[in-house]
Each structure stands twice: as structure tokens, then as C-alpha cells.
Image: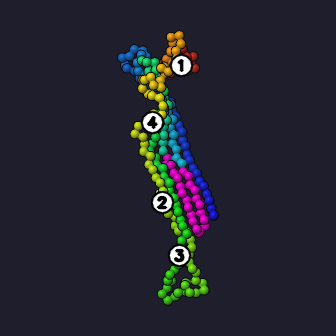
Amino acid sequence: MEVCFSFGAALKVGWEWEQDSVYPSDTEGLTQGQYTFDLNIYSEQEAEFEFKLFLDRLLSFTPNFTIDKFKAALKLGVNYFYDTNRMCFYGVLSLEDFNVDTKMRLALITWRKNVIESLWSYDNWSSREALIFDDISLSSEEEVTLWERSVDALEDDIALYGTQTNTDTDCIPGTIGSSAGFNYGSIIANNVAAYLQDAPSMGVRNEVLDYTY
């Protein structure tokens, strides 16, 4: 008797940062348009599980579960809108087509008896060496598909949370409180976005943030 388990999985992960500032060409200063900052996380994964039960000359039973290799992407981002001073956070998920299936390889015990070896001899039935079965062994393995499903790629990405649009929903300010006439959510968002936009083009490194309100 033999019982075996095997399991395999592979995962690759990578990421990159992106930032962009878009505004109308006729806009003076940072009064319109938006600043976007994204973290893109990419992954490639696959998995397989197999169980084998083998009983010598009696049974061989091997089910297998497989998830084909597929890619996925998670985008975590921030949009800052200059005209409303809103900073909006969002998460978006993208998936590639992949297949999931369960298959089984099966071999069963078989019995064989030669009915007639030759027309002039019946020794395989009547002699002292005659056997009830001339051969007892396993059949050849056959593979059958028990279950299979194709997961189609998403026509549209899944928005996990937040929004990419210039609205009050899931954005700051709007839910951040203010004190002494100042909306601190707006102040922080405005300073951070302006610094991130201006510092790379000016070659600024390790400089103190010029915080204004």
C-alpha cells in the first residue's frame, strides 16, 4: 500500500511607482487639474495539489487539483484635485483569464482468462497447472476530468475601495474636521501634493517640506 501527497505553488511579485500631474494648458498655477500617485503591485501565481492511493495489483487512485498560471494586478493610488483641494484614495484589482480543474487518474484490478489457447488443447482448463485466472493485474491508467471551470478576465477592473473621481465620497477634506477656521485635511493634502510634484523636477532631495497655509 502506498499513500502520497504532493503540493506545489509558485508566486512572483513585483511593483512600480507612477506619478503624473495633468492640468489645462491655459491654467495659471495649480488651480485646476489633478496630481496622481499610484503604487502598482503585480503578481503571477499557480498551484497544484495531488493525492495518490496505490494498492498493489488492486487499485491506483490519483486525484489532482490545478490552478493554471495567471497574472493579477493591484493598484493603490491617490488623486489630488487642485480646484477642490480634495485628496481621494482608491484601490483597483485586475485579473487575467485562468482555468481551475480537478482531474483523476484511475486504474482498477482486472482478471484475464484464456478461454481457448488452441483448438486441440484444453490444458488451461483441465490440467493440474490450470489456473482460475491466467493473469491478475491493474488496468492501464485512464484520466477523467471531474470538474473544470474557466475564469474569464474582468471586463472592468474591480474597485475595492475609494474613488478616482472628484467627489466628497472617500476623499479628504470633507470628513476631516477643522479648527480655528482651518481645514487641516485640505492643508495637508495641498502641501504634500505640491511637494511631490515640484521636488523631482527641481532636483530636490532630503529637503524639509515647506509647510504653508
Extent of the magenta region: 48-69
Which of discs 4 and 1 lies nearer the camera? The answer is: 4
Residue underneath mark 1: 204
Q: Earlier in the sequence, mark 3 or mark 1?
A: 3
Quadrant for the N terminus, please: bottom right
Residue located at (60% from left, 84% from top) = 129
| C-alpha distance separating marks 4 and 2 | 35 Å
Mark 1: few, some, or many residues within 10 Å (few <14, many ≥20)?
A: few
Residue underneath mark 3: 112
Q: Amino acid at mark 4?
A: Ile
From this view, report whether residue 51 is shown above or below residue 185: below
| C-alpha distance separating marks 3 and 4 | 59 Å
Residue underneath mark 4: 158
Mark 3: few, some, or many residues within 10 Å (few <14, many ≥20)?
A: few
Residue 77: give x, y in percent of width and height.
48, 29
Residue 205: give x, y in percent of width and height.
55, 20
